[in-house]
Image (spheres, coloured by chain):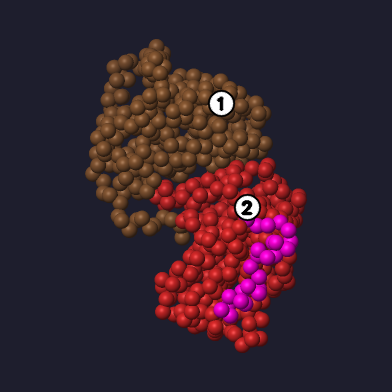
Chain colours: A red, B brown
Amino acid sequence: MAEMTYAEAIRDGMRQEMKRDRNVYLYGEDVGIFGGCFGVTAGLFQEFGPERVIDTPITETAIAGSAVGAAAAGLRPIAEIMFVDFMGVCMDEILNQAAKMRYMFGGKAKLPMVIRTPCGAGFSAAAQHSQTLEAWFTHIPGLKVVMPGTAADGKGLMEAAIRDDNPVIFIEHKVLLGAKGEVPEGEYLVPIGKADIKREGTDVTIVAWSLMLSKALAAAESLAQEGISAEVLDPRSLVPLDKEAILNSVKKTGKLVIVHEAVRTSGFGGEIAAIVADEGFDLLDAPIKRVTAPDTPIPFSPVLESAYIPSEEKIIKAVKELF
Amino acid sequence: MEPTKDQLLDIFKTMSTIRAFESKAVELFAAGKLPGFVHLYLGEEAVATGVCANLTIKDYITSTHRGHGHLIAKGGKIDLMMAELFGKKTGYCKGKGGSMHIADVDLGILGANGIVGAGQPISVGAAFACKYRKTDSVTVCFFGDGASNRGTFHESLNMASVWKLPVIFVAENNMYGISNSQKTSMNVADIADRAAAYGIPGVAVDGNDVIAVFEAASEAVKRARRGDGPTLIECKTWRWRGHFEGDPSVYKKPEDQESWLKKDPIPRLEAKLVDLKYATQPELDKIKSEIKAQVEDAVKFAEESALPDIEDVLTDVYAN
């Protein structure tokens, strides 16, 4: 094990796979000598050279669309879209091309491609550079959606995403990039579709992913001091979703709180709530609660932004409402 | 480079196959046998054929909603295509794609496409893969005059030109994007002029003259294989039918339709073949009737094929 930041761990995942398979290459805006807008790709250009770490023009549509063509022709592209907010610029390539090709072609194509993109508020970057949009992609059959919340998961899920024969939307959180954790060295795979219990507990299940995982863990720590034992479950990937793990946890605790940074309406928390209401109604002894951002664009001023982002306090409040 | 005798006879067969396939599709659609939308390539056969005659199985194409001609020209099998049009289990896509989504990745056909302009960035990716692997394969991207106005056009030609990718952009200018004439959609007469914006060659040719198309494509394919980058070829042509079957084309002037029908690319090629003494007219007529029989066989195959299994709704979403 080595201590690494979340950014370093994701980079190490890419590095391992690029060393292993020459069909893997990385491209996007400023991913080369600049090292990526958030530094995640730093050093890869020097290590693998300009043929495999490629700066593109500002051209999200051609980045995403050419990833589809290159993957259909047998390569394994890792494409970076600088902010998840920019995915709207290349949405046809994801919605109608990457996600649907295999099905439309009767199963006769595979598209091993990863689109890496950072989400999240916390830098006063305002409404066009701070969103958390995983729900868009979970609503499109044919895509896998991965959102690591720790450094080790960042590495292991990245390696698994690159080896996956399907389009994977790999959403990194900007606030987590500098967060440190213990990360296995060398080749390391975390299976996509397997949740992880990050803290065991008996009284309430908190499902949280990406940055919200660390807030849920902090809330659980505070709740423990007040005698409430919270289990914190990180699904790690939303598609496929490890619903068995969620149902098993609710079976143990009887209570469920779902936390996500995305806005509330049509957020993925609603989907998890629906699954548990449908398949685990008898397991529940209290209503399902969601802690989310409000249904607004993301404000600029730090005071407004911090009121917008779901906090540890809001999670604690939601949990206590169940007791 | 001019096509050889064998190439020209193959071109004749391919164009005749497209003509027979599409003419049959008109009948079948009118008879209510084909579900969904069907966009036909009648009148435009010289474009796909003249271009694809320069390709091998190792080269890629991306196609459009009006894709039957491209698929046949790249070697697509007409029985599997016809079965797909019928929505049968034996079709190219097991009945999951239909006319607008037929693909055969093993033949380098990266799919017809229901989104106008979507094939452009996909073709850039396939061309990137060819270059990355250091092969001399190329990718041809077919699209229409309508797709020449999409943002995908700009981003794709820009990326392909700056990276010198082996891709040939073939604009099939059939003069209309659904009901809108090219004149009301762009402020240039020749789409080929747009190549200048990317520092690549742009050539406009008579898209109903298969030899002119072949020669332009031959140059562009050679350039791409050499590593000198993309070319934009505009083929001026005319779609005989409506945008889709069932569109009465009220927006077209009858005199325009009539004058373009006179420029039918197939009799023009036949006259050339006879003139060059590559074949006699009776020989050509015999080939055409053999092809019609093959299309009838494809229809029979499609009609006699089983419908898809209901359980197949759920399969092929993800690769394992």
State the residue at coordinates (46%, 22%): B237
Which of these two is toward me, A262 or A99?
A262
Which span of residues is magenta-colored?
A: A297-321
Secondary structure that dominates the magenta span: helix
Image disc number at residue A195: none
Answer few, some or many: residues within 10 Å of disc 2's Cα (few below 14, many 20 plus, some between 14 and 19). Answer: some
Q: Is residue A248 above or below residue B283?
A: below
The residue at the far bottom in this view is A227
Query: Circle 2 is placed at which residue position?
Result: A85
Residue appearing at x 51%, y 56% in the figure: A143
Q: Position of residue A252 (x, y in %)?
A: 49, 83
The residue marked by circle 2 belongs to what chain? Answer: A
The answer to whether mark 1 and mark 2 are in CB contact below 8 A is no
Q: Identify the residue shown where x is 74% and y is 61%.
A: A302
Residue B208: % across, % down = 44, 20
Q: Chain for mark 1?
A: B
Asked if residue A177 can be seen in this view, the reply is: no
Residue at 66% from the left image edge and 81% from the top image edge: A222
Q: Nearer the viewer, residue A108 or A264?
A: A264
Which amino acid is tagged 1? Met
Q: Secondary structure at mark 1?
A: loop
Horizontal side of residue A198 vs B100, given as left or right: right
Q: Amino acid at mark 2?
A: Asp
Q: Is B304 left or right of B186, judged from the image as shown?
A: left
Q: Residue A316: x, y in percent? A: 62, 77
Identify the residue position indicated by label 1 in the image: B186
Q: Secondary structure at mark 2?
A: helix
Asked which quadrant contains residue A112, the reply is: bottom right
Question: What is the count of numbered marks?
Answer: 2
